[in-house]
Image (cartoon, rainbow, N blue to C red):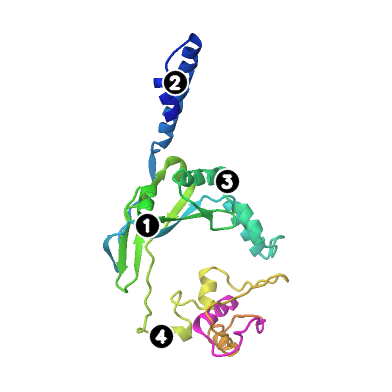
């Protein structure tokens, strides 16, 4: 547009035809320039998540380093959540004709995929600012981008600080909350990492332990009986012939059948835990059982 403005202002007028042509060029040049300037103006922004208080155990070390790297996740609003919830209840209810007819992962992804228009809004917001992004999920409900702290602060109209926990863990977060242009905020559930400060749990090494074995701890421990009461499962058992459950591990820990049976004897009095020995696949099916390796299979069979 600068070229056409130059032509408009400095081209000599020779004939009436030239006058008409030059007038048209000037009009187009000014129109294009005005439109371009309007498109680069900042849209009104609205708060997506407000400021938060600093959780116990954390302190602010100071402003985050501007050139530090962040991977932002834009959670684009999903569709079909009510339908998904309805379907979940139907396939989980033994009295339902659809009991056991679970959706495939592909079907869930398709059902909850954000609207194309919503994805376009977020994509355009990032692309117009020269930011490359990618889909972190099969249905693109998470769009990720790698940026610096300085760029993230401009994108989200916020300030990032470095936080340190008393345990030594450090994170970068925006305690002041953050904002997005109105049209983008309308289709985004949240952006992370921003206001959420993670919990840091320490191992409890003292206090009463008798309730671990008596199972009288109400909801203090995740025993099979407590979990069934917490989620109102009662004595209901899944009976669909196609029902399957699976557990996998990636920490190099081994499984021990004797440890699983000990768990059942300790915590499953009066209820049925598991339906026989599980089918074992892989190279860590024997050996000294690890805590993480056993935790999932103990819970899932309870």
Residue where numbered disc 3 is placed: 115
Q: Residue furthest top?
A: 16
Residue contact between numbered discs 3 and 4, judged by CB atoms under 8 Å: no
Which is in the foreground here, disc 2 or disc 4? 2
For residue 124, above or below residue 89 = above
Residue where numbered disc 2 is placed: 26
Q: Quadrant of residue 2?
A: top left
Residue 289: in magenta span? yes
Q: Tag 2, which secondary structure?
A: helix
- Residue count near mark 3 (Cα–Cα under 10 Å), binned few <14, some 14–19, many ≥20: some
Residue 92: in magenta span? no
Disc 2 to disc 3, how far (Cα)?
A: 41 Å
Q: Tag 4, which secondary structure?
A: loop
- Pick the front one: 57 or 118: 118
Residue where numbered disc 1 is placed: 195
On the image, the x and y values in percent for residue 71 come to: 44, 58
Is 225 situated left or right of 151 in this image?
A: right
Residue contact between numbered discs 1 and 3, judged by CB atoms under 8 Å: no
Q: Which mark is residue 209?
A: 4
Disc 1 to disc 3, how far (Cα)?
A: 26 Å
On the image, the x and y values in percent for residue 181 come to: 42, 42
Disc 1 to disc 2, how far (Cα)?
A: 49 Å
Q: Quadrant of residue 9?
A: top left
Which is in the foreground here, disc 2 or disc 3? 2
For residue 272, above or below residue 123 = below
Disc 4 to disc 1, how far (Cα)?
A: 36 Å
Q: Which residues are magenta?
A: 276-302
Is 270 situated left or right of 15 in this image?
A: right
- Residue count near mark 4 (Cα–Cα under 10 Å), binned few <14, some 14–19, many ≥20: few
For residue 123, above or below residue 205 = above
């Amino acid at each position: 547009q600068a070229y056409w403005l130059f032509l408009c202002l400095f081209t000599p007028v020779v004939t009436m035809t030239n006058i008409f042509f030059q007038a048209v060029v000037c009009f187009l040049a000014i129109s294009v320039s005005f439109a371009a300037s309007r498109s680069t103006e900042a849209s009104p922004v609205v708060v997506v998540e407000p400021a938060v208080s600093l959780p116990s155990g954390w302190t602010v070390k100071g402003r985050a380093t501007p050139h530090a790297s962040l991977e932002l996740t834009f959670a684009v609003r999903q569709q079909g959540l009510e339908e998904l919830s309805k379907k979940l209840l139907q396939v989980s209810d033994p009295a339902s004709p659809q009991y056991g007819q679970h959706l495939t992962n592909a079907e869930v992804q398709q059902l909850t995929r954000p609207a194309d228009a919503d994805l376009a809004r977020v994509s355009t917001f990032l692309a117009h600012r020269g930011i490359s992004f990618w889909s972190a999920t099969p249905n693109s409900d998470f769009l990720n981008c790698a940026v610096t702290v300085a760029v993230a602060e401009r994108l989200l109209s916020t300030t990032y600080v470095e936080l340190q926990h008393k345990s030594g863990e450090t994170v970068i977060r925006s305690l002041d909350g953050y904002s997005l242009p109105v049209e983008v905020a309308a289709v985004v559930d949240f952006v992370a990492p921003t206001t959420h400060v993670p919990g840091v749990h320490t191992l409890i090494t003292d206090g009463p332990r008798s309730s671990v074995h008596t199972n009288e701890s109400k909801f203090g421990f995740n025993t099979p009986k407590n979990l069934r009461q917490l989620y109102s499962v009662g004595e209901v058992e899944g009976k669909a012939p196609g029902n399957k459950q699976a557990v996998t591990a990636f920490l190099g820990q081994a499984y021990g059948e004797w440890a699983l049976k000990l768990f059942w004897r300790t915590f499953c009095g009066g209820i049925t835990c598991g339906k026989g020995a599980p089918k074992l696949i892989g190279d860590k099916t024997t050996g000294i059982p690890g805590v993480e390796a056993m935790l999932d299979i103990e819970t899932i069979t309870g």
